[in-house]
Structure formats: C-alpha cells, structure tokens
Image (cartoon, rainbow, N blue to C red):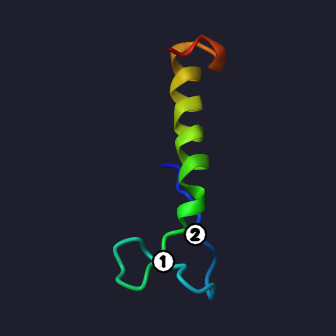
C-alpha cells in the first residue's frame, strides 16, 4: 500500500491518521489523487492524454 507521508518521527502532526493529534497536510491531496489516477491509467494501459 502506498501512503501519503505526513512527516517523519518527531515531526509535529506526524502520527497515525486515526490519532486525534494527526494534522493531515491538505497540500498533498492533489499529489495523492494524481498518483492514484496515474496508477489506474497505467494499469489500464492508458496515458493521461486519453483520459476522458
């Protein structure tokens, strides 16, 4: 499984996502979505320019 990294140990907000102290970095949402879209397109044998 691929995870979107929120920082390493000792970094503020870097803890398990189900922890109340987790501060998810909203700036990485677009990067994560692009990663998953690219992964699916690669699996389907399509490139970005053929996506609807």
Give the Cα distance between marks 1 and 2: 8 Å
Q: Earlier in the sequence, mark 1 or mark 2?
A: 2
Q: Is residue 19 left or right of residue 15?
A: left
Residue 11 position by quadrant: bottom right
Q: Residue at x 53, y 50 (%)?
A: 2
> Label 2 near label 1: C-beta < 8 Å?
yes
Secondary structure of the residue carrying tag 2 is: loop
Residue 45 position by quadrant: top right
* Vertical placement of residue 27 versus 48, above or below: below
Secondary structure of the residue carrying tag 1 is: loop
Residue 18 x %, y %: 34, 73
Q: Which residue is mark 1?
A: 23
Residue 6 position by quadrant: bottom right
Q: Residue at x 65, y 15 (%)?
A: 49
Residue 34 x %, y %: 58, 39
Q: Nearer the viewer, mark 1 or mark 2?
A: 1
* Vertical placement of residue 22 versus 6, above or below: below
Classed neighbour count for the residue bearing mark 2: other residues with Cα under 10 Å, few (<14), some (14–19), many (≥20): some
Residue 6's disc number: 2
């Amino acid at each position: 499984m691929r995870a979107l990294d929120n920082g390493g140990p000792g970094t503020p907000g870097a803890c398990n996502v189900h922890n109340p102290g987790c501060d998810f970095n909203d700036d990485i949402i677009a990067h994560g979505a692009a990663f998953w879209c690219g992964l699916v397109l690669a699996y389907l044998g399509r490139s970005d320019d053929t996506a609807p």
